[in-house]
Amino acid sequence: MRRMKVALELGKINDFGIGTYIRNLVSHLAKIDSINTYFLLESESNNSTALPTSENFQRVRFKERKRGEINPAEVQRFLRRQGVDVCHIPHDEVPRRLPCRYLVTVHDCVHILYPRGTEFSWVREARLYSKRRRLQRSEHIIAVSEATKRDVVRLYQIPEEKVTVIHHALDERLSTLQPSLDTQSVLERYQIHDPYLLYAGNVRTHKNVTRLIEAFAVARTELRDHPTYSRLKLLIIGDELASHQALRRTVIISRVQGEVRFLGFVPYEILKVFYENASAFVFPSLYEGFGLPPLEAMACGTPVLTSNTSSLPEVVGDAAVMVNPENVFEVARGMRQILCDDNLRQQLVRKGFEQVKKFSWITAAQETLRLYQVTCR
C-alpha cells in the first residue's frame, strides 16, 4: 500500500475531554506508524509538549482566528499545497470546503440532546442542519461508543455502515503517573479529614449534579449513626460553586452546606490522590458519549456508582453499581449499598481493574490507522 499523507487538526488539544483523545491518539499513532507522513495542524498559541517527535510527524502552526481556533482558509491552502490524502477532524466542528477526503470523530451529541437554555430554537436548528451536512460529506465517522453511534445515525441521518466505533481508553497521564505526592499532605492541604464520595467532571445540566447532591443528602441522613460514614462528605472536582447559583441553592435546601465541597480544577497528580482515597466514585450522569471518569476511578482501585443510561453501561460493564439517574432515592440507595457492603466493594474493585484493561489506546490507534488506509484506497 502506498504511503499516505495524513493531516490531524489539533485545534481542541487543550480541551479537557477532546484534548485527552487527541494527545493519546497521536502519541500512539507515532508508536505504530513510522512510514506515513502526518501533519499536526495547530494554532500558534499551542504549547503542548505531549506530541510525538518522530520524523514522520510534522507540527504545522497556523495563525489563530479566535481562542486557539485555526484559521480555516490557511488550513485549506496548506492541505491543497501538500497534496494531503486524508484529514482527520478529531471533533465534530468540521471546517467548510476541505479540499481532501476527511474523517470526523464524534464524541457525543450532547449539544443536540441537551442544548443550552439561552439559545433560540432556530439557532439550534441551523447548527444541527450545518453539522449534519458536513458529517454527511465526510468519508467516514468515528464514534467513541455504540451509544454515540446510535445517536449519530439517528440525529444526523448517517448510514450505519459509515460509522465505526473506536473506544477511548484510560488517559496515559493517569496510568503512567508515578506516586510522587504524599497522600496525607494532599488531604491535609485540602482539609479533608472524613470519608468522602467523589465526583469529577463539569456541572452542565446533563451531568445531573443537582440530583447527585439531593441523593447524597438522603444517603447521609440514613448513615448519620454509621460508625464509619456518619461524617461522610461529597467532593465535587472540576468546577467552582460560585458560577453555579442553582447548585448553591440545592446545597442549602438539602441542608448539606458543610458536607458538600466544590474544589474546582485540580492537576492530574492531585486528582489521582482524590480517586485513590475516595470511599466511592459517584457519576450519575444523564448522558455521556463515552464517560471516562468511571474508568479512571476503577484504575485507581475505587468502587464506582454510575448511570444505566447512554454509553455508561457499555463502558463500566458489570464492574459498577448502576442506577436510574433520574431517581434520587435509587441513587441514594446505590450509595449506601456501595459503602456498606464490604463484599460488594471488593468485588467492584477487582472487576474494575479488569474492565479498564478492555480499553487500549494502541488498539484505538491501530483501528484509526486502518480507516485512514481504507479511505485512501
Image: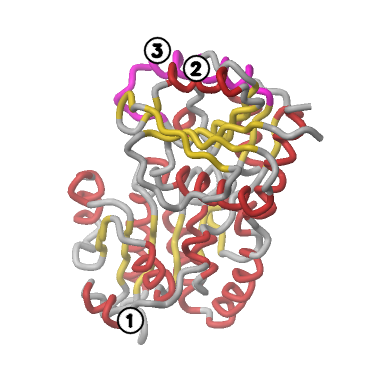
Looking at the image, which residue sits at the far right? 1
Measuring from the top left, give residue 43's x and y in whole percent. 38, 33
Label 3 to label 2: alpha-carbon separation: 33 Å
Q: Quadrant of residue 111?
A: top left
Q: Left or right: 350 with respect to 264?
A: right
Quadrant assignment for the N terminus:
top right
Label 2 sits on what residue type?
Arg
Quadrant assignment for the C terminus:
top right
The residue nearer to you, when weighing 56 against 91, is: 56
**Which label belongs to residue 182?**
1
User: Which secondary structure dominates the residues rendered in magenta?
Assistant: helix
Measuring from the top left, give residue 97's x and y in whole percent. 54, 13
Label 3 sits on what residue type?
Trp
Front tag of 1 and 2: 2
Please give the name of the residue rendered at 62% of the width and 22% of the height, measured from the top-left corner.
83
Magenta-colored stretch includes residue 117: yes
**Which label belongs to residue 351?**
none
Per the image, the residue denoted by label 2 is 77
**Which label belongs to residue 122?**
3
Other-residue count near label 1 (Cα within 10 Å), few / some / many at <14 / 14–19 / ≥20: few
